[in-house]
């Protein structure tokens, strides 16, 4: 039977169906492989885009972290504010003291004619006082001369009485 023509046709018929089935499955596998390859190409493109976006995001995050670090160096903390508040009260007290010290100057600025009159009066008073002082000094010099002359005369009188 293996050499018979019918057996051969029988085998060809049976194996022909299997061959068609295997060929169909291979074609199906090739189609699936092609679609998987196309999906891989798309995924590779998407993954490179995702990689680019990830790099950009990491750069942005790094930049923001650097900005945060710079901000943290220069930010105002509550301790700084407390120090400023205590210093501010000290400065206010100092300004109030200076303000009280400058009240006289503000009066002069507010009433310049009155200030000028006061200065003139003080200048005249000073001149009169200086004149009186110089006059007294001159008089005391002349008084000394008179006293010297009186003493000289007294000595002469005493000497004359002693000689007589």
Image (spheres, grey):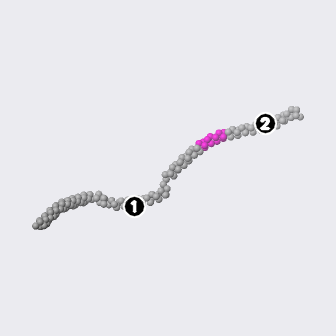
> Dot 2 surroundings within 10 Å: few (below 14), some, or many (20 or more)?
few
Q: Which residues are magenta?
A: 38-53
58 or 48, nearer to the observer: 58
Q: Position of residue 22 (x, y in %)?
A: 77, 38
> Dot 1 surroundings within 10 Å: few (below 14), some, or many (20 or more)?
few
Q: Is residue 40 magenta?
A: yes
Quarter of the picture containing the N terminus is top right
**In the figure, 155 relative to 53: above or below?**
below
Mark 1, residue position: 93
Residue occupying the point 70% across, 40% down: 32
**In the figure, 121 relative to 18: above or below?**
below
Q: Is residue 64 magenta?
A: no
106 or 125, nearer to the observer: 125
Quarter of the picture containing the C terminus is bottom left
Q: Position of residue 110 (x, y in %)?
A: 29, 58
Is residue 117 at all visible to an observer of this figure?
no
Quadrant of the image occupied by residue 96: bottom left
Is most of the magenta stretch helix, strand or loop? helix
Q: Is residue 15 left or right of residue 160?
A: right
Quadrant of the image occupied by residue 88: bottom left
Mark 2, residue position: 19
**In the figure, 44 relative to 122: above or below?**
above
């Amino acid at each position: 039977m293996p050499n018979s023509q019918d057996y051969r046709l029988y085998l060809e018929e049976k194996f022909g169906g299997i061959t068609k089935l295997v060929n169909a499955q291979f074609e199906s596998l090739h189609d699936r492989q092609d679609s998987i390859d196309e999906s891989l190409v798309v995924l590779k493109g998407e993954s490179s885009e995702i990689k680019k976006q990830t790099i950009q995001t990491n750069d942005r995050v790094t930049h923001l972290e650097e900005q945060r670090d710079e901000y943290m160096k220069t930010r105002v903390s509550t301790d700084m504010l407390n120090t400023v508040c205590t210093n501010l009260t000290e400065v206010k007290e100092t300004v109030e003291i200076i303000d009280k010290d400058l009240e006289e100057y503000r009066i002069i600025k507010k009433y310049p004619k009155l200030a000028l009159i006061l200065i003139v009066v003080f200048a005249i008073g000073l001149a009169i006082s200086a004149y009186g002082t110089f006059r007294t000094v001159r008089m005391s010099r002349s008084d000394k001369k008179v006293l010297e002359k009186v003493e000289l005369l007294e000595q002469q009188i005493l000497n004359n009485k002693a000689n007589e």
